[in-house]
Image: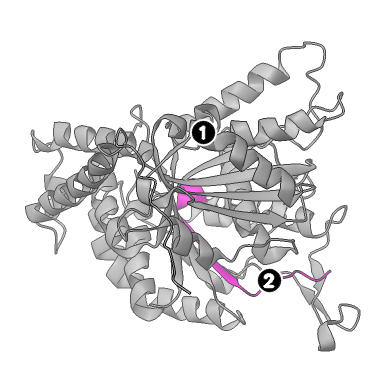
Amino acid sequence: MWIPGASLLTKFLLPSPLLVMANPFTEYYIVETQPGSNSLLIRVVGDGGSISKGKICSLKARAVLIDMEEGVVNEILQGPLRDVFDSKQLITDISGSGNNWAVGHKVFGSRYQEEILEKLRKSAEHCDCLQCFFVIHSMGGGTGSGLGTYLLKVLEDEFPEVYRFVTSVYPSGEDDVITSPYNSILAMKELNEHADCVLPIDNQSLFDIISKIDLVVNSGKLGTTIKPKSLVTSSAGTFKKWQEKPFDAMNNIVANLLLSLTSSARFEGSLNMDLNEISMNLVPFPQLHYLVSSLTPLYTLADVNVPPRRLDQMFSDAFSKDHQLIRADPKHSLYLACALMVRGNVQISDLRRNIERLKPSLQFVSWNQEGWKTSLCSVPPVGHSHSLLALANNTCVKPTFVELRERFLRLYKKKAHLHHYLQIEGMEESCFTEAESSLSALIREYNQLDATKSMPVEDLPRLSVAV
């Protein structure tokens, strides 16, 4: 099997809470590429673009897996997908970061920088046309927030022309890591300065999506039978040899996000979108690079034929707060730009019609009223005839940052747990004040944009050209 665009991407997956996403993402990837097969062999394109003349190769993920504990990495190496990941492209430690950003960033960052760079170069050498790096990390712990953001600086220094996409999982207010506000706000400063695009994800939103799906699954109502493998929370199934764990459903949602995001690089389509076009079209200002994502449909019903109106519902759901991967309501906030990445049996006319239908209910900044970017990939995701990933540069992301700052200030005003950070070489109290200032400046930028919501859009006259 030929994988179009397989040489375009390099991914990092880290740390322990998110390293397990390597399994569902890779499993879905294989099932999408080779439906009905569990083979780890692929046929790559041969001379003259001929697939039949291509040679058979084993499937290997272009990924560097990093964790400062060994447990999750060992689990991957003992699992059914162990042959997909190159054991020479793994970096682990024993002690862990102890939920301390300073340990992950200052200690492990400098300690493993050269080893990371070496493995990074090896992975990049296999890419014919390197488009971007994906960094997948959590914000609340020590390794994900600290070492994860250290990687961004390394990537910026070594590959300044390659885009850096980051998927960051933000802790909820009920997070059991007491120092997560410190870790998150210190990481935010690095994301502001070194990332090209950040796709924030909120644990609570993932829980809410799972709960919504469970209500439908367990309702027992007529007409609510769900098509097998169509749940956005379910595993692809082909390689699953173990009992699913509590967080697998959450990881599967994020895996589906990444699959849709990279679909244009992997499959053909009438209107494919390069990854660099996302940053180019959706990020009008360098710091405002936080994109709110939504996935739809969350499932497909097996006992009805989907009429055309259901396709329209897919587009409407993408702007509903119930489908966002962070707690946000983009429909009642201000858009800077929006991308609609469609997969499957959808026509360009359907896409344009739905944009025109939804436009009156969405408020865009006055200087970018036509701020839409669209793509159509021919291959649908597993279990669906079509799907939609919406990426919105929208001021609705601001409440997440405001809440994070409030949680940080509650701890910082008491100087609680500060000594754990200050005992690390290179850490000073100014690191916290600078991080808070960086986040406050970001919030102010969103406030300034929100203040323009009530301003009327000027109907500028067309330029007259004398002939």
Residue count near mark 1 (Cα–Cα under 10 Å), binned few <14, some 14–19, many ≥20: few
Q: Which residue is found at the position 44% from the left and 71% from the top?
A: 466
The image shows residue 90 at horizontal and vertical percentages of 52, 67
Question: Which residue is disc 2 drawn over?
Answer: 5
Check the image and report above or below for 152 versus 136: below
Q: Nearer the viewer, residue 444 or 293?
A: 444
Instruction: Tell me, for residue 360, which label it has, or none.
Output: 1
Check the image and report above or below for 357 versus 43: above
Most extreme residue toward the bottom, as rendered? 47
Check the image and report above or below for 150 versus 254: below
Check the image and report above or below for 137 versus 306: below
What amino acid type is highlighted by mark number 2?
Gly
Cα distance between the residues tagged 1 and 2? 37 Å
Residue 16 among magenta residues = yes
Magenta region, residue range: 1-18
Residue count near mark 2 (Cα–Cα under 10 Å), binned few <14, some 14–19, many ≥20: some
Q: Which residue is found at the position 83% from the left and 62% from the top?
A: 39
